Amino acid sequence: MDTTNDSMVSEFVLTGLSNSWEMRRFLLWFSAVFYMGIILGNLFIVLTVITDSCLHSPMYFLLANLSLLDLGLSSTTVPKTIFDLFTDCNIISFPKCMTQIFFIHITGGGEMVLLIAMASDWYTAICKPLHYLTIMSPQMCVSLVVAAWVVGIIHAVFQFVFVINLPFCGPNEVDNFYCDFPRVIKLACVDTYKLEFIIIANSGFISMVTFFSLIISYILYLHFVWKHSSGDLSKAFVTLSAHISVVILFFMPCMFLYVGPFPTTSLDKYLFIVDSAITPVLNPAIYTLRNKDMRVAMRRLCKWIMGPHGISK
Ligand SMILES: *[C@@H]1O[C@H](CO)[C@@H](O)[C@H](O)[C@H]1NC(C)=O
C-alpha cells in the first residue's frame, strides 16, 4: 500500500473486491455477462432508433438517450471492476477515483431527469392525445435531453467542488468495488459532517424528488385510465407494474446510498450493483420488448444487418 504518513494519498485500495476466490470468480462472471447485455441491449436500441425512420418520435428519442446514459453509467464502473477481478489488482489512482465519482453523478443525475421526461411524455400521449404533438415538439424533446445533461453536470459539480480539495492523508481503503462520495469522504482527515449533509441535500434530494414525481405521475395516469376506461385497469396495471418495478429497483439503492445514515454496513456495494448492472439491462428490456413498433423495427434492423443471406422469417 502506497501511503506515506506525512503526505497525501495518491491512490485508493478498493477492498470491496478482496473476498474469497469463489466470490471473486462469481463476480467476474456476473459482471462480464451483465456488461455484455448492457452494451448489446442499449447499443441495439440506439442503432434501431437512429436508423429506423418510423421511430423518429419523442418517445424513442428519449429512449435512445436513456440507453446512452445507461451505457455511460455502467461503463464508468463495471469495466474497471471486471479488470480488477481479472488481474487481481484493486488499486485505483486518486484522479481515476475522482473521475469515477464525477461520471457516476453526471450520468445518474441525467438519467433521473430523463426518466421524468419519459414519464411526462407517456402521460401526455395517453391523457392529452390532442395536444401531444404541440406539447412534445421536437424543440421540447431537445430541451429535455439538454436539461438532463445540464442537470447531471450541475449536480455532479456541486458535490465535486467540496470533495476534490479534501485532504486525504490517512487510511486509503474503500470497502467497495468503486469510488463514490459516501465511502470516500469518510477517509478525509477532516470532519466531514457538513459534507455529508451537502451530499444528502444534493444526491439524496434529487433521488427522492425524482422517485416521488414518478410515483405521482403513475398515480395520475392510473386515475385517468380508471376514469376513461369503464373500470378495466388490468392492461394499464401490467404496463405500469413493469415501469414501477424498474423505478423502485433504480431508486431504492439511490435513496439508501445517499439519504443517510452514511454506510456502516457493506450492503451499499451490493445495492450499487443493482444500479450499475441490473437496471441498465432491465431498462431496454422493459421499454422495448413490450413495445410492438420497437420489436418490428428491431427485426427490420436485424434483417438488414444479416443481409439477404441472413435468417429470414
Ligand atoms: C437524443 O435526443 C435528441 C433530441 O431529441 C435526438 O436528436 C437524438 O437523436 C437522441 N439521441 C439518440 C441516440 O437517439
Image (cartoon, rainbow, N blue to C red):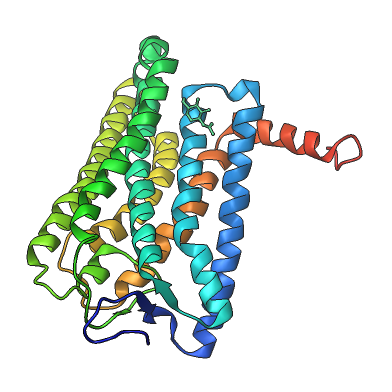
Q: Is residue 50 above or below residue 242?
A: above
Which residue appears at 24% of the width and 57% of the height?
255
Residue at the farthest front position: 6
Tell me the residue at 21%/53% (across/down).
161
The front one of 238 and 187 is 187
At a point 39% along the width and 47% down the height, the residue shown is: 107
- Counting from the top left corner in percent of width and height, residue 143 is at 36, 24
Q: Residue furthest right?
A: 309
Q: In the rendered view of the protein, which quadrant contains the N terminus?
A: bottom left
Image coordinates for residue 140, horizontal then vertical, percent? 37, 19
Question: In the figure, 118 relative to 78: above or below?
Answer: above
Which residue is at 31% across, 60% downward?
253
Q: Position of residue 293 (x, y in %)?
A: 61, 29
> Is residue 83 at all visible to an observer of this figure?
yes
Q: Is residue 229 visible?
A: no
Q: Is residue 13 left or right of residue 217?
A: right
In screen coordinates, is 6 left or right of 246?
A: left
Q: Disc count in the image?
A: 0
Q: Split into 4 quadrants, where in the image is the C terminus?
A: top right
Picture quadrant of residue 274: bottom left
* Above or below for 307 versus 192: above
Measured as percent of width and height from the top left, residue 119 is found at: 36, 33
Asked whether, in this view, residue 298 is left or right of residue 79, the answer is right
